[in-house]
Image: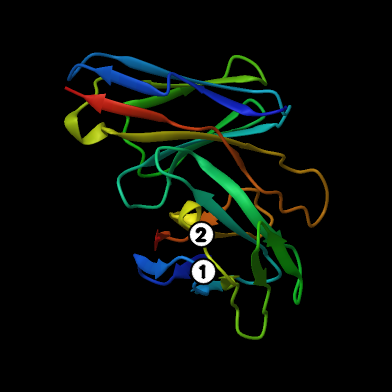
Amino acid sequence: DAMVIQNPRYQVTQFGKPVTLSCSQTLNHNVMYWYQQKSSQAPKLLFHYYDKDFNNEADTPDNFQSRRPNTSFCFLDIRSPGLGDAAMYLCATSRGGVGQGSRPEAFFGQGTRLTVV
Amino acid sequence: GDSVTQMEGPVTLSEEAFLTINCTYTATGYPSLFWYVQYPGEGLQLLLKATKADDKGSNKGFEATYRKETTSFHLEKGSVQVSDSAVYFCALNRGSYIPTFGRGTSLIVHP
């Protein structure tokens, strides 16, 4: 089945030690998103790629970076994780610009639970 | 800007009870509307959607009707099960391909 896969499901990292989360998709969608979700809150969009174009949300800290080497893969890099960065990180994809009036749904991975110790 | 407002949770029900989770939205034009479900420790899954006024989305016994006159998309189920316990997110997409999510409503179903 076509899907969005995130690795690992659980990640423990040390305070200040760089960490990378991975996302891959077999849907061939041109848009990929990274969300941060803290307990009992809605997902918060960090940034997204529309094709190769990177779009950062205004309030996303500089500590968060992303790479998309090709259509299928996208990475979230946290340069110096702090205790406040412990959260569930969700990758999602959708089709953008497929036609006038298109309003596609997003497809989510299972998430990576990040713990900072 | 666009926004989605959901009822505060948690909603606590006994098995086989009737469920309503309210969702209203603010957006110009004609957005598509969605309900996503998030089971504990998992990502979000699309539950149902509606793309135009008066459309009814349905899946797994859940239903929601796109009401443009009241800007609402309330989620309903006639008889909930323990396995329906999850967080439910209402969302809209007005054509910018980025969904706008509500804050989520937690549902707890007791045997």
User: Which quadrant of the view contains residue A25?
Assistant: top right
Locate the C terminus of chain B by quadrant. bottom left
In the image, is A37 to the left or to the right of B99? Answer: left
Residue placed most toward the observer, A34 or A6 = A6
Disc 1 versus disc 2: distance between alpha carbons?
Answer: 6 Å
Q: Is residue A99 above or below residue A26?
A: below
Q: Secondary structure at mark 1?
A: loop
Instruction: Name the residue at 48% across, 47% down.
Output: B38
- Which residue position is annotated with label 1? B16
* Residue type for callout 2: Gln
- Crowding at mark 2 (Cα within 10 Å: few <14, some 14-19, many 20+): some
Q: Secondary structure at mark 2?
A: loop
Residue A72 position within the rendered picture, expressed as x and y whole percent measured from the top left? 65, 20
Residue B71 position within the rendered picture, expressed as x and y whole percent measured from the top left? 60, 78
Instruction: Name the residue at 52% across, 64% down.
Output: B80
Q: Residue B81 — which label?
A: 2
Q: Are the numbered discs 1 and 2 placed on the same chain, yes or no?
A: yes
